[in-house]
Amino acid sequence: MQRRIRMDRPVSRSSRDLVLTALRARGPMSRAELARHAGVAPSTVTGVVQDLMAAGLVVTSAHPRDRAQPGRPGLRLTLNPRLGAVAGVEFCFDRLRVLLCDLAHNVISTADCELPYAHSSQAALAAARKLVDEALAAARMPRDALIGAGVSVPGPVSRHPDEVKPSAILPGWHGVTGDDIAAVLGVAVSIDNDSNLAALGEHVWGAGRGCDDSVTLKFNYGIGCGLFANGALVRGVGGAGEIGHITVDERGPLCRCGKRGCLETYTAISAIMDALRPQHGRLMLPELMGLLSARDPGAVRVVGDAAELLGTHLAAVCNLLAPRRVIVIGPMAAAGELVLDPIRTAIRRHIAPNAVPQVLLGELGERNTALGAIALALDESDWLPRRRVRPGAPSRDPAEGSSQARTSAGGLA
């Protein structure tokens, strides 16, 4: 298995390695962007890129966003997509999703399956190994082409060493380490919680692109938050961004974390459905979204109240971090302005007298977490291409998916 390099202290690297590392982690870039991200002079980048292209390690392509602009599309540089692949493995409470991405940041294969709600880590990891193998087969890539995997779990994760922390939220995973997961998957892994990786996915590929300071709110059956400051994901020792477990009322409802009155108990999807039960009975998520689409007054009011309460606590986060963007993701983001407008109103009301952040929806849908897992693995890997190859095919936008290969293991939602 590939080892992981931890960037806790400066490591001396050649310009060639810096360029390759930047392309691996950030994907398609112009020469100017590459010089900035690699920290190498533009003149040096030109010479290094020429050598790498001659060796077939770097290729050029027109990015889809550039093709949409008038005039001649600008060419971007990427690693040759034929060099290898990285897997993004997303464990949900009752579902498992795998995305396979080449080194030009194209999604080339997907697979998913259901998991028992109270699944054990052993059963879930065995299913993940099976789906990764299926995704590789669908993409017609050998297993040794897999250079790493990023893994998302819906619970707190400690850092150095990577380990799933004790939690009532994910009882079947207590004590599972990154090394345990790597042993099952047969490849080096990086792990983090789902909110952090969803934020990372949006930062690299979605609504957070080009923004060094952002807050990503996950509005789901749980309430999570991913934080970017000065271009870096804020992770602490594990558990950073747990906005959903800020105490609103110490005598409030019992939260699944074991405390009372957490923000999540008033604002999560389950709390919204409970509030609507007297009028509408037991609701499922599609029924709730149908009520919102029909502008049912009660549903609009309850969702608006929850979003406003979230906005109030987001304002406190904004006062601490002064982000440029607040990105809203998760199932409730599909409600659009019914969610965004109350959040904006509350932030404007409670934020300190400084710039009010832009509040917008995420762009990656349900893929943001698995794509973030891929981004984490690419960023933390020390893998660099060495062999000479022939240039490969041009790259595409990873958010668009791929028509090349798709497994039938349940389909990607």
Image (tube, helix red, strand yellow):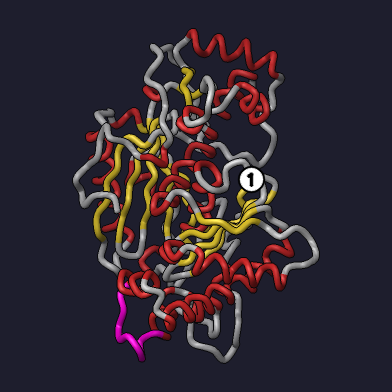
Quadrant of image for the C terminus: bottom left
Front-most of residues 52 and 301: 301
Q: Can residue 75 be seen?
A: no
Q: Residue at x 75, y 58 (%)?
A: 355
Q: Is residue 399 found left or right of 225 in the rendered image?
A: left
The image shows residue 359 at horizontal and vertical percentages of: 60, 59
Does residue 282 belong to the magenta stretch? yes
Q: Residue at x 42, y 85 (%)?
A: 275
Q: Which residue is mark 1?
A: 211
**Vertical relation: 84 (above or below) 381:** above
Front-most of residues 239 and 289: 289
Q: Secondary structure at mark 1?
A: loop
Q: Residue furthest right?
A: 353
The image shows residue 215 at horizontal and vertical percentages of: 61, 57
Start-end of magenta stretch: 276-284
Front-most of residues 176 and 15: 15
Q: Residue at x 53, y 27 (%)?
A: 70
The image shows residue 169 at horizontal and vertical percentages of: 43, 71
